[in-house]
Amino acid sequence: MLPSQLLAIVPILATPAIASLVAGNENYAAVSRALRRSTSLKSRSSPSDLASTSVTFSVGDGDDSKQYLSPIGPKHKSYTLNAEWGLDGFTGQTLAVTVFTVEGEVTCDVLGKKLSSYASVDDVWDEAFMQAIVLQSNSSYHVTEDVASCLQGWGGSLLIKSGEATSNVTDIGLSLVSGSLVPPGPYLARIDGNVTLTELYRVYRDENQAFTAAIIPTTDGKFTDLSTSAPGMNTLSIPVPSRLYTLDLPSPRALEGRRVAVKDIFDIAGLKTGCGNRAYYNTYPARDVHSYPVQRLVDQGAIIIAKAKTSSFANGETATGDWVDQMCPYNPRADGYQQPSSSSSGPGAAIAAYDWLDNTVGSDTGCSVLCPSSSNGVFGMRPTWGRLNLTGVMPMAPSMDTAGFFSRDAIKGRDFSKAWYGDLFGNYTELPQTLIFPEPEWTFDSDSPAAPIYNAFREGITKFVNPTTIDNRTFDGFWNDTGMYAQTGNETVSEYYADVWGTLVDYGQWTTFAEPWFEDYAAVNDGRIPFVAPSPNTRWSWGRVNLTQADYDEALRRKAVYKEWIIENVLVPDNNTCTKTIYIAPYDDGSSPNYRNLYRAPPSNGFFSSGMESFIVGNPQMMLPIGQVPYESNISNHTEYLPVTLTMYAAPGCDYVLWDLAAALQESGVLSAVSTGRTGFPV
């Protein structure tokens, strides 16, 4: 249990006023219970309500083949073009077609350039979708006779004109239709009197087993779990839409067309939330509304393509020992058998593995975005706590829960951050003038392969920021210099907050989330208790047996004291720079492979004593991949490369200072975007 409350012998030790901010997910269990009860009272849906099917097909042969899916039914988007003339001979046919928006004179050369552009920006479009072409325009246009031979060369036999068009095309099918403009790109066209166009999705294999559901949107604003078979071992197949559908919209939203996968603790309307546990998945029905963070993504035009795996109830887990209900995702880096870290394991592994995925969303309560970012060698951010509402997100510890994300590119990460979070964070007019490089973190062994990488980054960021002050103190150094060591009875930083995180998680998640779920599960399972994986089971057992509400309150008090001390002495807010300082420290030097096939000690109760600053304070913390170092793998018997990473802290609310700085460093060559696969950087 926590020690009794210290006497407030100095002002800093007096309990600060607890902020009125709430995370928004405090009542998640009650909402889930109400949803289960309301759903049980509803009558079953009729078959027509559930009507949803898909056409699947492949293009090409063998390893080079591409798999496709086109969803059909009243709940999926389609476009109707009304036949005027020329389609009678094609009635009953289904064709793979490409829609072009054109103007003026449409020649073979014009269409050829458009096809080259399509192929360069879209991984879904294929020349196989030229069985027919649909031309459309807001103005009059003319199709020249050479288009016929080009279309035949591309494998097509039908030209469908829409709008005010003339042509002198012969030797191919020619028709005229009317209807509203549709987004350019590939479609499946069903001709039955009129032409019905349904969207095409390319299906990718989830070879790294990062996802728990493949999803597509429905016309009612929800999503459905809809996949198709793609060859692979124990893999889901993930449908992704053509990028052409959103490429030339007249008023694109900030995240228009960006493909995003979301951790399976965020509610998505139309889908169940599993939280990494089979029993929980089966306790509650599909959610009827999006979580607030997901709704913001959808509102900004993001395309949610999958639910990504989480470790059990977002607790820390390692492969082989802890993952029971699901297979732990595979980290693509190095030999492919390194731990992906947790709890946002799926989002972290997926963004490092798949170039057809743009961003992934995770949660961070205690390194759940930061640690997978480092292990998988990508950019990741734990944002300022309490700014983005977490309604509809499973709680781990509402006083520390945040919604963060992953990116392979700092510039694109900056843009994603500003689109998703909007005006939730502060502005600034100039860069901070104090950089903190804490010793001994910046002292390296003479033979350290990572030392030149770290030193080059330090030189680069120092030259770019041109600070007036360089500080070398650690958090403990600031603690000692401000008298806190003596004032707390000779407690170091880690000793002062040692019990805070574990208490808030072990006691808090059990009482606010797990205990109500146990009751709901027992009510529909003849009094049984659900299976819980070792890590959360250990923590919840500890919390309900060894901790009390008084311990929880004391943890909140210490958390508030430490936060106030940090923002007064280390990560200090500023009107011009937002944060007076940026704290920069090496994180993982790549010197220790972390194999996933090893048996490990049983999980702990979650009482950690170092590296907890951003979790307790609620300030933003960013993880940056800055290089890679070689090692000899005992898996592949080959030289492989592990990521080298670094972390930066800023004052609460100054998230954009970190993202803007990282993006600027990438533009100046100090940082670079990372690739997918075994290595993030060229070898």
Image (tube, helix red, strand yellow):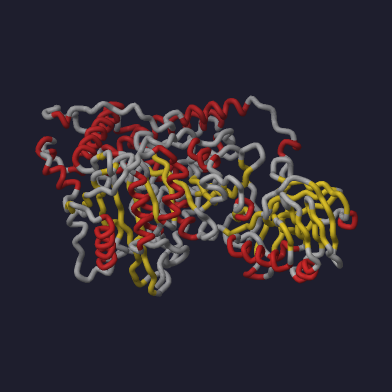
Image height of 92 relative to 423, above or below: below
Q: Is 411 displayed left or right of 563 in the figure? A: right
Residue that appears at 21% across and 51% down: 436
Q: What is the quadrant of residue 461 in the picture?
A: bottom left
- Compared across the picture, whether 429 is left or right of 404 comes to left
Q: Residue at x 76, y 37 (%)?
A: 48
Residue visible at 54% across and 26% down?
34
Q: Nearer the viewer, residue 360 or 42?
A: 360
Residue 571 lies, in percent from the top left, at: 24, 43
Number of numbered discs visible in the structure rendering = 0
Residue nearer the viewer, 41 or 469: 469
Asked if 175 appears above or below 270 in the picture, the reply is below
Q: In the image, is residue 150 above or below residue 608? A: below
**Residue 451 percent location from the top left of the image:** 25, 66
Residue 276 drawn above or below residue 677: above
Query: Is residue 279 visible from the viewing direction of this image?
Result: no
**Which quarter of the rendered picture does the N terminus lie within?**
top left
Taking the spot 78% from the left edge, 52% from the top edge, the residue there is 162
Counting from the top left corner in percent of width and height, residue 515 is at 43, 31
Spot the residue most to the bottom: 638
Q: Position of residue 490 (x, y in %)?
A: 11, 40
Which quadrant of the rendered structure holds the C terminus? bottom left
Query: Could you say which is closer to the camera, residue 335 or residue 16?
Result: 16
Residue 386 appears in the picture as rendered: yes
